[in-house]
Amino acid sequence: MADFTRNEMMTIVAARALKNDDVCFVGIGAPSAACNLARLTHAPQITLIYESGTIGTRPNVLPLSIGDGELCETALTTVSVPEMFRYWLQGGRITVGFLGGAQIDKFANINTTVVGDYDKPKVRLPGGGGAPEIATNCGEIFITMAMGKRAFLDKLPFITSMGHGPTGKERRAYGTKSKGPTRLITDMCVFEPDAETKEMTIVSIHPGVTREEIAENCGWTPRYAAQCGETPAPTAQELEVLRDIQARTKAAHAA
Amino acid sequence: MADFTRNEMMTIVAARALKNDDVCFVGIGAPSAACNLARLTHAPQITLIYESGTIGTRPNVLPLSIGDGELCETALTTVSVPEMFRYWLQGGRITVGFLGGAQIDKFANINTTVVGDYDKPKVRLPGGGGAPEIATNCGEIFITMAMGKRAFLDKLPFITSMGHGPTGKERRAYGTKSKGPTRLITDMCVFEPDAETKEMTIVSIHPGVTREEIAENCGWTPRYAAQCGETPAPTAQELEVLRDIQARTKAAHAA
Amino acid sequence: MAKFMGLAEAIAQNVRDGDTVAMEGFTHLIPFAAGHEIIRQGRKHLTLIRMTPDLIYDQMIGMGCADKLVFSWGGNPGVGSTHRMRDAVENGWPNQLAIEEHSHAAMANAYEAGAANLPFAVLRGYIGVDLPKVNSKIKSVTCPYTGEVLATVPAHRPDVGIIHAQRADKEGNVLIEGITGCQKEVVLASKRTIVTVEEVVEKLNPPSFNSVVLPHWTVGAISHVVGGAHPSYAQGYYKRDNSFYIAWDKISRDRDTFLAWMKENVLEKTPEAFAVHAKKGSA
Amino acid sequence: MAKFMGLAEAIAQNVRDGDTVAMEGFTHLIPFAAGHEIIRQGRKHLTLIRMTPDLIYDQMIGMGCADKLVFSWGGNPGVGSTHRMRDAVENGWPNQLAIEEHSHAAMANAYEAGAANLPFAVLRGYIGVDLPKVNSKIKSVTCPYTGEVLATVPAHRPDVGIIHAQRADKEGNVLIEGITGCQKEVVLASKRTIVTVEEVVEKLNPPSFNSVVLPHWTVGAISHVVGGAHPSYAQGYYKRDNSFYIAWDKISRDRDTFLAWMKENVLEKTPEAFAVHAKKGSA
């Protein structure tokens, strides 16, 4: 088994979840790396969309922002931002939306707005951006987040984007037709929602990670699926392609 | 004085009413001829917009339809039809909208929908097209129509686009900020709305036309402004430019 | 997901009796070849949506394809009446034709709302006019901020959207340029779509970053039909046949003349017959 | 009606204390030179609207230009926090900053509604989230056809809209290409507008019929400022200075370091100083 970091494992697992015919709404960071890794390995036909308006983009380096010039230069077409949110996201054209965030709860609701009181915040986070509507208008949602007690919380101070709702029942109650978060991919394990309760449940543990470690980094007592197995380790090819694009990216952005 | 037809007089009077800084929403027929005549004579900077989405177009021949290729080829830019109606017309960007129609009343309401009952029409006319919203969203409206008893009616069977309303009071009552019809240019004379009653009132009579003739071709008893004068006859240059573009147009469409 | 096929197959697979069909193209790129194929395949009871019915719907209505027309301006542009449409509305020939009539602004907004997956569109329109009295689909909402009352129309969500475009690449991405009308909206608002194209190319080579391109995963059937927009036009390929629009007035005025023309030029022809027009009218 | 003038004059004539100002450019074409000029002219009490405040509003907020921020994502893209914005919200430095927070979809729709002269926008959004609890501007309407309840936001109608574009022709027609964001909407929705451009040319030569062009009668002041989008970029002219975005994290973290940087790079400079960036980062 090749040497790999937990962050690499997270990105690689996210990439594996993507299919050739997916249309992905990509965020910056882990999602962008995962989507482009998928494109450069098993899903060459995947369509990547960034909210800047670039559709079907094929960057050679990962963008620092969602609007880097390379995204537009390699895109099939670039539309205005109002059109992107109206025709493409709200239009129901996206199969997979990627989200991340500062804090998450067991029903995959996410906070990226504030820590503390909204009007007198302890920490003012960036805010929702596209997330509130990505969460409900994409076919399904994949979330990538590194685990930790300050990130995986029993109760969020603020819901920026809805997962399955505060008690797991609200999404269905709203009549939202999209599936919501179907995968929460962390640096330690993979969660999927329980069919009944919608609580995010661990379905596979990354190589070298223990249940104790997961418990220490989770603000609630995590449930495990009956057939919880081990996540297949990164292949040499996966690691090579990922490291290659990240090296190119680092060189490009430092220039 | 040069020889000219009444139709030429109508088009030339309409052209004269246009200014260099006008942004015109142009219809087919007399309006298109008038707008392009203005552009080729005293208003070279005038902006012509056709509802097909062509903005700032400078055709060499008059289009047969509002979407002829020449309009796009000579335009500054061409936008989608939804954008045309949302950002440009409804957006309040148009200073002068041109309308014509099958029937008109003394408050410059227009019918282009049906003669007879709507559900069992005697004559089914083309319908409103852009007119209902042109009538209220442009800064002001110029109307060109040839007079006749079947066209200039005391009461319309159907209001396709609002002038000043059925009694001349409704436009103001709706709170519409645009001026509505400020000029009704016919083949015999020019009407403008009375400041108070909004009834279309004759402000000038074309050379060679009598008040009797006007009365015979108007379904209501027309009012005359106190200072009603004679419309200045077409100049040799106006006639030459108009006939020239119409000859070019005829040759092009017969091809 | 785009799939290349012959036009006959595309119509057979996608257009069913009773469907709501929108065929758009604002003067430019009107999908005439597709309309003729629908006539040849004898589709009935269609609800036809189009801002300007133009000659294409005049032909389809005259041949008895339609039970209902949703439109905003029904004439022969710059020429006069669409006689077959008038004959259906005024005299019920060849069958009764129900109409749902809007303004251009409302129709454009209804497509826009359909593409945006909204159930309705809001517009500052229909003020002081009679159309809302005869079209119960026109309603209103009150602005929650200013109290202003604005008109609404339901979104268009056709069963089938049909357009003609300049070209597609091998993957099925479609480029439209020039007067683009509301074709992007029609494709995005429709459940199934058919695109006829002038040309299939290796790469689209769009002339700018912001060209109007429909990705292959937004379109259904693509059929290569050279000249498929005639007597409308395809910018960069061939010109509008204005003389045919003028000639149509006489052809369509009389029922028998119309039927004879349709027999000779539609029923006894195939989509390939359109190619000759592209050659003749090349821009 | 477009009028060419220097940037200092354009800002002096159009931006007043207390104005609501929208400066857009989605990553691309952010009007930094105009922002610096507003800082130099010491404007106060502005309400700043922008989807992503980015470094430009971080700088303006840190220099005390703003009383209020209307936004949807406030961070340094791909890097981390906008520290000056955080310092204002968390600690009231250099002054209290009121915020009105939306989602991207709502902001984009609010500009779109402003351009379309509608008082509000309707979107399928804000479902199951807390933002409507802290932003009273978010309301709802009921669809008159389906009964569905949809979110609304008021249209943006800024006093001043400011954008950066690739080029203008001598008449003042403006071309934008690449990632066009919501700049067309900002210009059409604003009472007054300022456009800075990389280049003034004889003819725009738009690369396609459907290029994003703002006619000269839709724009107000036009100022020729080479490099005026740096550290953002101008497609076809120079690249995004990603290394500066990374460096800003350190510069902006500390109040004194920030003030020293602003003094040296903004207060003591003129719009002409931007030209060097265009040369350095040419694409």
Image (cartoon, coloured by chain):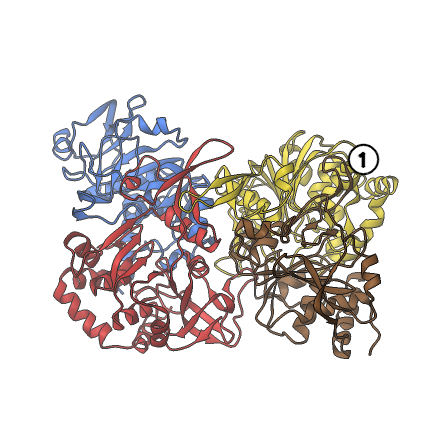
Chain colours: A brown, B blue, C red, D yellow
Q: Nearer the viewer, residue B208 or C244?
A: C244
Q: Quadrant of residue B131 in the image?
A: top left
Q: Residue drawn 38% across and 44% down?
A: B25
Instruction: Quadrant for the C terminus of chain B, please.
Output: bottom left
User: Which chain letter goes with mark 1?
Assistant: D
Q: How many marks?
A: 1
What residue is pinned by disc 1? D91
Check the image and report above or below for A201 versus B66. below
What's the amino acid at mark 1?
Answer: Asn
Q: Nearer the viewer, residue D150 or A45?
A: D150
Q: Residue C26, percent across and down?
A: 37, 57
A125 to the left or right of C249? right
Instruction: Quadrant for the N terminus of chain B, please.
Output: top left
Q: Nearer the viewer, residue D62 or D96?
A: D96
Local crowd size for mark 1, using a 10 Å CA cut-off: few (<14), some (14–19), many (≥20): some
D282 to the left or right of B98? right
Considering every residue shown, the one lying at the far front of the view is A226
D8 to the left or right of B165? right
SS at circle 1: helix
Check the image and report above or below for C98 versus D89. below
Q: Quadrant of residue C23 in the image?
A: bottom left
Q: Residue D85, percent across and down?
A: 76, 41
Q: Residue B159, percent across and down?
A: 26, 38
The answer to whether residue D22 of the structure is visible from this angle is yes
B156 to the left or right of D85? left
The answer to whether residue B13 of the structure is visible from this angle is no
Q: Residue B238, percent across and down?
A: 30, 44
Check the image and report above or below for D204 versus A62. above
